[in-house]
Structure formats: C-alpha cells, structure tokens
Amino acid sequence: MTGPHGSLPHEVRAFFGVRAAGWDAKFPGDGPAYAAGVAELGLRQGQRVLDAGCGTGRALPALRAAVGTRGTVLGADLTPEMLTAAVRAGRDACADLLLADVARLPLPSSALDAVFAAGLLSHLPDSAAGLSELARVVRPGGRLALFHPVGRAALAARKGRRLTPDDLRAEPQLRPLLARSGWDLVQYTDEDTRYLALAVRRG
C-alpha cells in the first residue's frame, strides 16, 4: 500500500477508506509479485502467518497455499473498507480477518511463525514501535517480509517524488531500525520490479 508517510491511524483509515473499492482494479497485475514475495518467507505446511496491513488481501491466497489447510492465516488491517473489499473478493475464505492496528495486535507473544507486510513501513507512526510489536508476536527464529511489488525508485517516480537518503526503506536506514526492534536483516532486494527486506526474529 502507498499513502501518507508515517501517518496516524485515523489518517491512514481516511486515506485508504475512500480508495478501497477500486484498489484492486488500480493494481491489477500485482498478483504474481505478491506470490513471489510470499515464497521468500519459506513457509511450511501447518505454520502460522499474519498479513500485517493486509488491505484487500492480495497476499492471502498465496499465504494460505503456503501453509495449507492445517496452517493459520490472519489478515489484519485498521481500515474497515479494505477488509470489506477483501471479503467481496472472496479472500476471507483464505484467512481470518482482523480489524486491528498492527501496532497493537490482539495476539499473544510468540504466536506466529512469520509476518508478511506489504507497504506497511511508511504508514507506521512509530516505525520502531510497530516493528517491535511484530517481533513480539513472532517466535524466535520466525521471519518478517517487508514487501512492495515495485522498488523504491519506481514507487517514487510513480508518486512524482525523488528518493531521499532518509528513506526508512533504504538498507542503511532499515538495517539498524530492524535491529533495534528485535530483527536481523538477512536479505535485501530493491529493484524496479520488487522491493523485499527479509528479517529473522532474534532469539
């Protein structure tokens, strides 16, 4: 997802609420990129995974396929209209959907094996606190995928902006941010057709 950087929850809801109904139509070709991003998590049958800031749930079918019928797939988003769009698309058949702020998840500690987060980082009012909350709900050794279907340069161009050195998604900024939040960055890809930062939960 893209929108106001570091926005407060009510601003994020307002931004995405009015865009939810047409969101999938605006990005019709993203499905394969999402599936490839999910594959990088290396999920196994029976595991437990969260799509944090799931929006209309474009990653949910791939997540369900990865963990199988015995696995658990959750999709959390704080915009009701986005979850309504996910239901309309039938993706609630792939996951349990939660109306929740990912910075305050209604989940016990170490409940998950992995988190997939597409375009989430720029919407967290406090990036370190949000990533720390994701670390709380993931077991030691579990994984986090920060994903976007296009890279930083392509995304900036799409929005008519220039890349800046203080971009949190740049590796020199992201690596220490993740480290402070309980994660070790183990893979970083930023190319025109994909952005993926893969991290492992510290023990």
Image: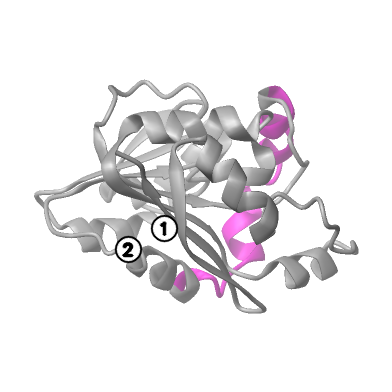
Q: Is residue 199 above or below residue 183?
A: below
Q: Position of residue 126 (x, y in %)?
A: 66, 29
Residue bounds of the magenta highlight? 10-31
The residue to which callout 1 is attached is 59
Residue type, numbered disc 2: Ala
The residue to which callout 2 is attached is 62
- Any part of residue 120 in sight: no
Q: Are marks 2 and 1 in contact (CB under 8 Å)?
A: yes
Pick whichever, 195 or 54, lies toward us.
Answer: 195
What residue lies at 27% left-to-right and 48% top-to-bottom?
A: 93
The residues bearing labels 2 and 1 have C-alpha atoms spaced at a distance of: 6 Å
Pick whichever, 200 or 56, lies toward us.
Answer: 200
Crowd around label 1: few <14 · some 14–19 · many ≥20 (10 Å): many
Residue type, numbered disc 1: Ala
Crowd around label 2: few <14 · some 14–19 · many ≥20 (10 Å): many
What residue lies at 81% left-to-right and 50% top-to-bottom?
A: 166
Of helix, strand and loop, which mostly describes the magenta segment?
A: helix
Inspect the magenta stretch and tell me whether residue 23 lies in it. yes
Q: Is residue 114 above or below residue 133?
A: below
Q: Position of residue 30 (x, y in %)?
A: 54, 70
Q: Position of residue 174 (x, y in %)?
A: 62, 51
